């Protein structure tokens, strides 16, 4: 197969990939629907309209365009609030129906991978309780966090293959008065963004042709149960997931390659909280410095909670070691929202990020000082007590 | 005493039978047969592993040890090496379809369940996070961004902490106007989460890690369950019933 290349992929012309024939993976949906027929569980169908995409081993996956029950992320909502806000803002711009539930808990997988202070039945029951609530609310779960996405895929495999676990979870759901529900597809928000990319590009208001980005994919997105992950022969000759790269590409930015693309960010779950010297060192030397040395990008895009936190926050201390750092980090969805004219502070909430992003905004054609002044002005009514909160109407 | 692979072994050796019991607990986990297929020592997992670049850690040693059923070395890894794993699952690219990261997850779970001192040490400064996620249903909260806890994250953390209340109220989605939780979780949902913890023995698991956190958590859980007319002590662990 002839390698398909975009002129905007800086560096990729130095690499040759040969696509191997697709390995047919088992389509878990047959098992899921079979269990439904046997009355063991209820499958939450992907609502229409949806877009069909190809996954790593050739299975067709349905990505719904709207009707999402937004399964939020602890780290995104807590420390990077521009992440969920940008997702919701984009839905609102396209008048797409969505639901932002309060009847949602964390998947608790960050804690589980950090401490293992839990067990398989508890983890599965937490997943199914969230999915059951989505079914009760009449929406389809969209997963914001890469780790939730990975963990729920693992949970799906376990529920399908361990009857004893299904029995335990069913007992718990019965006691909670909720159905045993599981979605037809596990969908990550960046997959929704991926299938929306052309519509977003049609409405972009910024010229991003002078912006070079590098991309860091989340390990729990593309390494943990990789069968669900989108792969596309038009990007990387089908050898890497196109998610994030494709949206940056269609928005007109240049996507640069670097040698440690497959490396993790150094988050480590417990490491980021209690062994931070590991996270800092890995993020700074294996990721940021490599990108800076090899591609000198303006921006690093990522798709997960831990990755964004680690890659952004680890750069401050690395400066003391004279590391080549100073690379703004944001999610693909914040970048897409900015491209469509979202306010960098009222919507994208970039003031929560550590690395100085103002030179980047200026290069993107956004007056950062003016935007900050507008944001500060909008805080006035809150500070004076005139308003308790800002709403969507205010932004 | 069994010979140690570590020059600076920090934990007490125990009789072989104790180690064997722990080893068997790992092997009895329902995931074991899917995570451990057998190792032909190619080293692909080590090449992919981020931790191996910075720590005395090797996913291959984990897999080989378990494959060989080397119970003495298993006990050493369980007290030391497993806590260095990043749980990124880069090692799942194993051509034999092993999951060294998954084996580590099981080993950690058994270490916690059995109250190993090394597990308590590994989670000593982490247990407040366990309290946060188990009591609120969200793992991290905006008010955790404190300069004293994250001095290495730069001056922005201080700025966020100083403006936290106003900045949170300036975020448009109304679920995010919180400072102690990542988002506003309803009491009904927290109650259901507590029920899951009780029904799966998760609360009792925390007692093995940190008795102080267990006591505070127990009170928080009991209080809300009371409001829903459920006596926490009367909720039985369904896993024990089975």
Image (tube, rainbow, N blue to C red):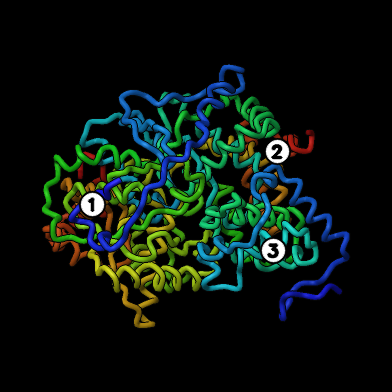
Which secondary structure lies at badge 1? loop
Q: Earlier in the sequence, mark 2 or mark 3?
A: 3
Residue under disc 2 on the same chain as residue under disc 3: yes
In depth, the one of A131 and B177 nearer the eye is A131
Residue bearing mark 2? B232
Q: Residue at x 67, y 50 (%)?
A: B36
Q: On the picture, is A260 further left or further right than B226? A: left
What residue is shown at x 27% (from left), y 48% (from top)?
A: A2
**Disc 3 on helix, strand or loop?**
helix
Instruction: Determine the residue positioned at 85% across, 60% down.
Output: B18
Label 3 Cα crowd, 10 Å radius (few <14 / some 14-19 / many 20+):
some
Q: Name the residue carrying label 3.
A: B120
Q: Position of residue B139 (x, y in %)?
A: 51, 51
Judged by depth in the image, the label closer to the viewer, 2 or 3, is 3
**Quadrant into which the N terminus of chain A falls:** top left
- Could you tell me how far apart the alpha carbons at marks 2 and 3 are, in whole angstroms? 26 Å
């Amino acid at each position: 197969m002839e390698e398909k290349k975009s002129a905007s992929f800086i560096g990729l012309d130095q690499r040759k990939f040969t696509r191997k024939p697709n390995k047919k993976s088992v389509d878990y949906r047959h098992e899921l629907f079979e269990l439904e027929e046997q009355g063991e569980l209820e499958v939450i169908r992907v609502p229409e309209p949806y877009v069909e995409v190809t996954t790593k081993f050739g299975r067709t996956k349905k990505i719904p365009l709207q009707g999402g029950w937004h399964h939020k992320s602890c780290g995104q909502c807590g420390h990077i609030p521009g992440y969920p806000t940008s997702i919701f803002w984009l839905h609102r711009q396209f008048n797409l129906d969505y639901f932002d539930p309060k009847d949602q808990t964390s998947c608790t997988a960050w804690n589980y991978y950090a401490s293992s202070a839990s067990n398989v039945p508890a983890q599965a029951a937490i997943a199914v309780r969230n999915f059951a609530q989505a079914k009760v609310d009449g929406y389809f779960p969209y997963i914001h966090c890469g780790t939730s996405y990975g963990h729920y895929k693992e949970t799906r495999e376990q529920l399908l293959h361990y009857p004893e676990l299904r029995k335990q979870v069913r007992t718990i759901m019965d006691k909670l008065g909720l159905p045993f529900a599981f979605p037809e597809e596990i969908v990550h928000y960046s997959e929704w963004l991926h299938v929306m990319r052309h519509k977003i590009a049609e409405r972009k208001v910024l010229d991003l042709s002078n912006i070079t980005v590098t991309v860091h994919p989340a390990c729990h997105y593309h390494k943990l149960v990789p069968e669900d992950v989108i792969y596309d022969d038009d990007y990387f000759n089908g050898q890497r997931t196109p998610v994030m790269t494709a949206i940056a590409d269609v928005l007109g930015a240049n996507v640069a390659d670097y040698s440690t693309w497959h490396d993790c960010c150094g988050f480590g779950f417990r490491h980021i909280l209690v062994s931070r010297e590991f996270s800092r060192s890995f993020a700074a030397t294996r990721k940021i410095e490599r990108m800076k040395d090899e591609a000198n990008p303006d921006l690093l895009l990522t798709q997960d909670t831990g990755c964004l936190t680690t890659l952004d926050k680890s750069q401050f201390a690395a400066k003391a070691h004279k590391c080549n750092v100073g690379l703004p980090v944001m999610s693909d969805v914040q970048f897409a929202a900015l491209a469509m004219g979202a306010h960098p502070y009222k919507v994208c909430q970039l003031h929560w990020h550590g690395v100085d992003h103002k030179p980047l905004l200026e290069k993107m054609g956004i007056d950062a000082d003016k935007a900050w002044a507008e944001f500060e002005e909008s805080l006035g009514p809150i500070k004076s007590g005139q308003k308790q909160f800002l709403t969507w109407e205010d932004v | 005493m069994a010979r140690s692979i570590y020059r600076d072994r920090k934990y007490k050796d125990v009789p072989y039978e104790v180690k064997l019991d722990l080893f068997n607990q790992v092997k009895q986990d329902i995931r074991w047969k899917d995570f451990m297929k057998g190792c032909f020592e190619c080293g692909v997992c080590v090449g992919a592993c981020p931790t191996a670049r910075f720590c005395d850690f090797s996913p291959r040693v984990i897999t080989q040890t378990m494959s060989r059923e080397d119970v003495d070395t298993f006990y050493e890894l369980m007290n030391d090496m497993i806590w260095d794993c990043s749980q990124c699952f880069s090692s799942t690219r194993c051509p034999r379809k092993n999951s060294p990261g998954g084996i580590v997850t099981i080993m950690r779970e058994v270490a916690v369940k059995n109250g190993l001192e090394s597990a308590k040490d590994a989670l000593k400064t982490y247990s407040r996070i366990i309290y946060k996620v188990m009591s609120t249903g969200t793992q991290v909260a905006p008010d955790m961004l404190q300069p004293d806890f994250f001095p290495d994250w730069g001056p922005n953390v201080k700025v966020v902490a100083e403006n936290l209340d106003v900045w949170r109220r300036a975020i448009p989605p109304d679920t995010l106007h919180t400072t102690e939780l990542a988002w506003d979780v309803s009491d009904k949902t927290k109650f259901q989460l507590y029920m899951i913890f009780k029904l799966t023995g998760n609360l009792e698991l925390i007692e093995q890690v940190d008795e102080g956190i267990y006591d505070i958590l127990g009170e928080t859980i009991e209080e809300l369950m009371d409001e829903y007319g459920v006596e926490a002590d009367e909720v039985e662990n369904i896993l024990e019933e089975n």
